[in-house]
Amino acid sequence: MKYAFSGKTAFVTGGTRGIGKAITEKLLAADAAVVIAYSTSQKDAETMCRMAEADGRRLFAVKCNVGDPVEVKAAFDFIEKHLGRLDFLVNNAGITRDGLAVRMSDEQWLSVMATDLNGVFYCTRSALRLMMKQKYGRIVNIASIVGLTGNAGQSNYAAAKAGIIGFSKSVAREMGSRDILINTITPGYIETDMVSGIPEAMKSRMLGSIPLGRYGSPNDVAGTVCFLLSEDAGYINGAVIDVNGGMY
Ligand code: NDP
């Protein structure tokens, strides 16, 4: 489906790779002005900005560790200065630090909480301040199937992703009357860097549990994000949308 986001502005966290990059490219193709946050991929961010400019699109990149409230505040200062308003926030940045709960270090637990859950809170809080003034906003969070099913070796990640769902449903109740909608996508297995280290045997077991018989692509998630940001989704709020090929 083609979307038209001319005049809209968006902030996508983790916009340089994988799912975030696909979301950014779809938003730019629909004519939105986009700011992406990167943590380490400065070169990729700069390349994307150059390519977008050559294409006549408006793309800006900010270095912003979403788990650090000071950096998030600076990113929103940048957004206010360069875009003036914020229509769409996509909380996409995420990491994994897998290990069994019994052996999990504080660092493994806290780093995943900081990026995957605290980051969603910090960015959403700042976005809401702008969106409340505008009386308009759309927020989409990228959680995970693992936040619904749990997964051995991913208790930290599952807890953070399940936390996003509760957070999102609460904000949906707080903000609906201001035409600020917030929804969560729970992707299944999507082929990106994040899953590239999974052993082949485990991958083929997973494939067997996907009724569509294929892994998801970043574009499968990006398409759903654009739908949720569009006016066609204007009555969807506090929802959790599976994008998993029927896996769960
Ligand atoms: P990738 O590992 O390919 O990309 C992760 C992105 O997050 C990168 O752009 C990275 O930026 C950014 N990022 C990581 N830490 C931070 C941070 N502290 N601050 C800002 N940005 C950060 O992952 P995917 O594209 O696969 O995942 C995107 C989202 O989708 C994540 O939330 C993930 O949990 C979720 N997801 C993914 C699934 C999958 O199968 N791939 C399944 C279910 C959910 P940089 O390169 O600059 O470090």
Image (cartoon, rainbow, N blue to C red):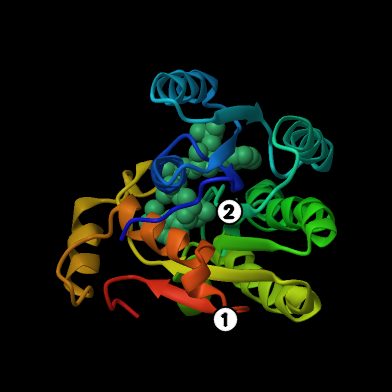
- Split into 4 quadrants, where in the image is the C terminus? bottom left
Classify mark 2: helix, strand or loop.
Answer: strand
- Split into 4 quadrants, where in the image is the N terminus? bottom left
Give how far apart the Cα atoms at labels 2 and 1 are. 18 Å
Picture coordinates of residue 239, whole percent (x, y)? 56, 79
Pointer 2: what residue?
90
Picture coordinates of residue 34, whole percent (x, y)? 56, 38
Q: Is residue 246 left or right of residue 20?
A: left
**Which residue is drawn at the image coordinates 17% and 63% (left, top)?**
214
- Disc 2 or 1, which lies upstream in sequence? 2
Q: Residues within 10 Å of mark 2 (few under 14, many from 20)?
A: many
Pointer 1: what residue?
235
Task: Name the residue nearer the viewer: 1 or 123.
Answer: 1
Q: Is residue 52 left or right of residue 174?
A: left
Task: Name the residue nearer the viewer: 93 or 206.
Answer: 93
**Quarter of the figure with residue 162:** bottom right
Picture coordinates of residue 133, whole percent (x, y)? 85, 57
Name the residue type under label 1.
Tyr
Classify mark 1: helix, strand or loop.
Answer: loop
Name the residue type under label 2.
Val
Instruction: Between label 2 and label 1, give the one nearer the viewer.
Output: 1
**Which residue is drawn at the image coordinates 19% and 77% (left, top)?**
211
